[in-house]
Amino acid sequence: MEEQYLLEIIFLGTGASVPTKDRSLQSIVVRRGSEILMFDCGEGTQRQMFAARLGLNRKMKIFVSHMHGDHVFGIPGLIQSMSLLGRTEKLRIFGPEGIRDFIESINRTVPYNLAFELDVTEIEDGLVTSEQEYEILSAWGKHVIPCLSYVLAEKPRPGKFNVRIAKRLGVPEGPLWKKLQMGKSVTINGRTVSPRRIVGHSRRGAKIVYAVDTRPCRSIEKLARGADLLVAESTFDDSKKDKASEYGHSTASETARLARRAKVRKLALTHLSAAYKDPNVLLRQAKRIFKPTILARDLQRLEVEPSKK
Ligand SMILES: [Zn+2]
Ligand SMILES: [Zn+2]
């Protein structure tokens, strides 16, 4: 009963403000088993989902950072395409104040004929949702309008199940294995078998942080502490430090310093200004401060494994 499990990031759009021929607008997806967790939904996101072969009828939640167009204008198109393609699964959307009005005004003015349920929740910082296997938490960053960063924190994963010992102890495959895996004892022919004999120690879950459209700040640093992956903005390079500060963004070095202070394992830069013909300048500046940095590309996939510690 080895764990069948995949935690994968797919960068659907990595650009800022206006799309370019190489970069669609901001959206990333975390594929967690059969569920899709989407962070931001810039214009054209549904087309990027087709390109990434993600399908539009999966269990899915969307988390919106803030009410700027390059982060939300993809939602109407995505809902429209989902309707036309016969989605039946409920779609949950979380975001700061304004997200409900935005979705409702489109529902009111553009007839979608929705065949699925839309559930929109306005949130503040703190716990956003607690599911069986993970939690989503949020924190306010520092932007020109209220903007949330998010963390996906998996709950500890169950320990490894030792099939050989289970068979030796005469525990038949099926519901009893599941019970043991969940940490409960089972009884076989009047004999109690403890999970300790068959299931190993529980393992640490992964932590992924998404922080865009923000100045570097304490709340984000705290949110990102010890993350396996920090996906964060680098809208500008270091020569545009003043502009970054004025517009509530970060430079490559500022984000790299935050990643280093927060002791994350890996940093992926996104939300790159369309002005950069060669965005590698951002990567070079960040890597000087924090080596395990990558520059995210549209449709790039990245598998995330929690650290063993
Ligand atoms: Zn933006
Ligand atoms: Zn913004």
Image: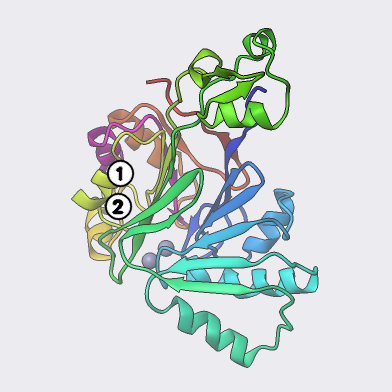
Instruction: In this rendered view, identify the residue nearer to me: 5 or 188.
Output: 188
Q: Mark 2 sits on what residue?
A: 250
Give yes or no for residue 266 being in the magenta stretch: yes
Q: Mark 1 sits on what residue?
A: 255
Q: Position of residue 145 (x, y in %)?
A: 30, 72
Q: Please tell me in which quadrant of the rendered image residue 173 appears.
A: top right
* Residue drawn at (30%, 37%) of the image: 259
Q: Position of residue 137 (x, y in %)?
A: 37, 53
Residue at the extreme bottom of the image, as rendered: 109
> Is any part of residue 125 visible from this angle?
yes
* Image: magenta residue range: 253-273
Separation of marks 2 and 1 at Cα, in angstroms: 6 Å
Give yes or no for residue 135 being in the magenta stretch: no
**Location of residue 81 with respect to 177 vertically, above or below:** below
* Residue drawn at (37%, 49%) of the image: 234
Q: Position of residue 305 (x, y in %)?
A: 50, 28
**Location of residue 14 with respect to 155 vertically, above or below:** below
